Amino acid sequence: MAEVQEAHSPKIGLLTKQDILQMIPQYHIRSIFIRQHLDREIVIGTIGDRGGGKSGSDAVIGIIEFLLSGKKVWSNMVIKCDIEIDDITAREYGLNSGGVAHYESLPIEKDALLKLDESYRGGCLVIEEINIQYSNVRRFMSNTNVDSNEVWQQLRKFKTSLIYNVIDEMFIDSQLRSLTDVFLMTYDTAFDLDSLHEKKNTGVDFKWTIWPMSGYLAGEQGKYLRTHKALPSVFFHFQPWRGVYDTYKHQEKGTYSLSKREREKALKAEITMESSDDIENGVNEYQWLIDNVRKLKQSKMEYLEAHQLWQVLEIVENGKTPKQMGSIVPSFGINKHHQSTNGKWIYKIESFSLPTNKN
């Protein structure tokens, strides 16, 4: 049944109520990678171990960066997202009542894509395990690889972006590697050593390490070719996006959905990208820790034995235990490095910037 405009709501061209509902979330959920003013495509390659969050990360990036802004996403996965919009917010955009904004990817027709069909203009391709069907380094002269490489090189003319994942970037053809703007390595923090001991569930938080291969993210001066450094790691809080995603289904049939929450919180859902020098539960609660870590990094110390580290960070004075801090300090770039001859853990203090004090 065709949708009709809601009574007494303003007419915006020939938009239906669902069209308006689908426009709203983009104003409440911030972009991750896209720089709108550049008005060009982006190629993102997500890498990581099995179960490390590649598919989930790519699906959410596709939703945030493209589906929410009204652009098409074509994928060999099924990517779905329902966002409930409350009445109060809906009225701000001229509707009498809220509802559910639905987003869904379109399937990829491989033959049509490889023939550069005009229908693949102006959106984003999200390709799961791209080395299996399109770009495999061991089949670099196959017809599929040759045709795929032509497609990747024509993306600029199509203004079509590409998000793909693969276990290792060396699994794909070298031409695709050279065209990639951003490599994103992800792993599920449930596999951290401390998280394993604490039996943390999977699919809650992913840690992203981002390499700017072109000047798109960090400028020409900041790209990896010049700096040989990744950007500061970030945490992607995936749990709100798990929804009805069934990790036991085949990936190409997986469904990703934003969990429906209480109406007053529905539009507060957003991708949480926190600098690794932030603590997820709130900076204010841990300001003492940020201050002490800042002093430690300014001291240029590179290694500290565990008990010395806890003294410098003043954890006892602030009511924390070594066990609690063991799962927190990696967020600040302080990681277990090796054990001394007497069995004591030695921590390495990585050098990177910390947030300035908030007045």
Image: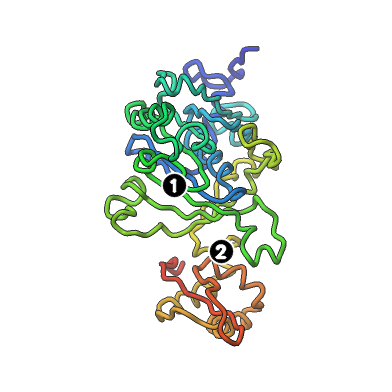
Query: Which of pointers 2 and 1 indicates the residue nearer the eye?
Result: 1
User: Which callout, 2 or 1, points at the residue further toward the start of the chain?
Assistant: 1
Residue under pointer 2 = 279
Say which residue appears at 52% left-offset and 25% top-offset: 108
Question: Label 1 near label 2: C-beta < 8 Å?
Answer: no
Q: Nearer the viewer, residue 170 or 299?
A: 170
Inspect the image, locate mark 1, and give the three-letter code of the amino acid beneath it. Answer: Met
The residue under the point 57% across, 53% down is 206
Residue drawn at x 40%, y 57% as measured from the top left: 230
Density class for disc 1 (Cα within 10 Å; few <14, some 14-19, many ≥20) is few
Residue at 43% x, 44% y: name it. 33
Check the image and report above or below for 264 versus 293: above
Q: Is residue 291 left or right of residue 211?
A: right
What's the residue type where badge 2 is placed? Ile
Q: Quadrant of residue 94?
A: top right
The percent coordinates of residue 166 (x first, y second) are 51, 43
Left or right: residue 170 versus residue 75 is: left
The image's mark for residue 51 is none
Q: Specify the quadrant of the image occupied by residue 139.
A: top left
**Label 2: element kind:** loop
Q: Which mark is residue 170?
A: 1
Instruction: Report the residue that reaches farthest toward the top.
Output: 1
- Number of on-image labels: 2
How crowded is the residue under tag 2: few (<14 C-alpha within 10 Å), some, or many (20+)? many
Question: CA separation, marks 2 and 1?
Answer: 33 Å
